[in-house]
């Protein structure tokens, strides 16, 4: 895979389509959400690290390749709605969609690693259940 710069990585993650997402906000977190937007996808907390000098021989980072990470967030239900049993299956499917989408995504110069968790997050004053995928790849 060719070298990928940070903004290209973030844009590639923003452009990945995740099944069941109704509204994709791309690279900009939403200023507000409505039920009609759910499930809604957006990015947050991009970060990167790069060594100026590489002295080792093994591992992508030892060759001066950037380690790039972004959180892909999918808001899927207001917290006030609870998390009833029938939504447990929907939650598991959403986590599965995120994992499958981003482990196969061609977003960096190395294959991405993906870690997904479910949490709650406030967006424009309303708390939502969200699935957060931390997507990392080498540049």
Image (cartoon, rainbow, N blue to C red):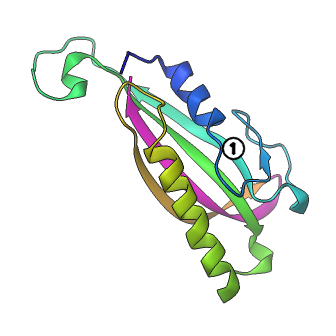
Residue 100 lies, with reference to residue 27, above or below; the image says: below
Quarter-wise, where is residue 81 in the image? bottom right
The answer to whether 66 appears left or right of 54 in the picture is: right
Query: In this figure, which residue is indicated by the disc labeled 1?
Result: 42
Res. 99 in view: yes
Residue sitting nearer the eye, 89 or 66: 89
Over which residues does the magenta segment extend? Answer: 124-139
Residue 136 position, x and y percent, is 41, 39
Kind of element beneath mark 1: strand
**How far across and down, in percent of the image, does residue 118 sit?**
56, 66
Label 1 Cα neighbours within 10 Å, binned few <14 / some 14-19 / many ≥20: many
At x 48% / y 30%, what residue is drawn?
107
* Residue 83 inside the magenta-drawn segment: no
Majority secondary structure of the magenta segment? strand
Q: Work out whether 69 lies above or below 102.
A: above
Q: Residue at x 49, y 21 (%)?
A: 6
Q: Nearer the viewer, residue 26 or 20?
A: 20
Residue 68: quarter of image: top left
Asked if residue 84 shows in the view, the reply is no
């Amino acid at each position: 895979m060719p070298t990928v710069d940070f903004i290209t990585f973030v844009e590639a993650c923003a452009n990945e389509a995740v099944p069941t997402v109704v509204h994709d906000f791309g690279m900009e977190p939403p200023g507000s959400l409505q039920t009609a937007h759910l499930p809604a996808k957006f990015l947050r907390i991009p970060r990167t690290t790069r060594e100026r000098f590489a002295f080792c021989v093994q591992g992508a980072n030892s060759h001066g390749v950037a380690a790039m990470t972004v959180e892909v967030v999918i808001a899927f239900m207001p917290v006030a709605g609870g998390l009833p049993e029938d939504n447990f299956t929907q939650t598991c499917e959403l986590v599965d969609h995120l994992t499958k989408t981003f482990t196969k995504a061609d977003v960096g110069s190395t294959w991405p690693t993906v870690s997904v968790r479910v949490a709650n997050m406030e967006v424009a004053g309303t708390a939502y259940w969200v699935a957060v995928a931390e997507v990392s790849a080498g540049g």
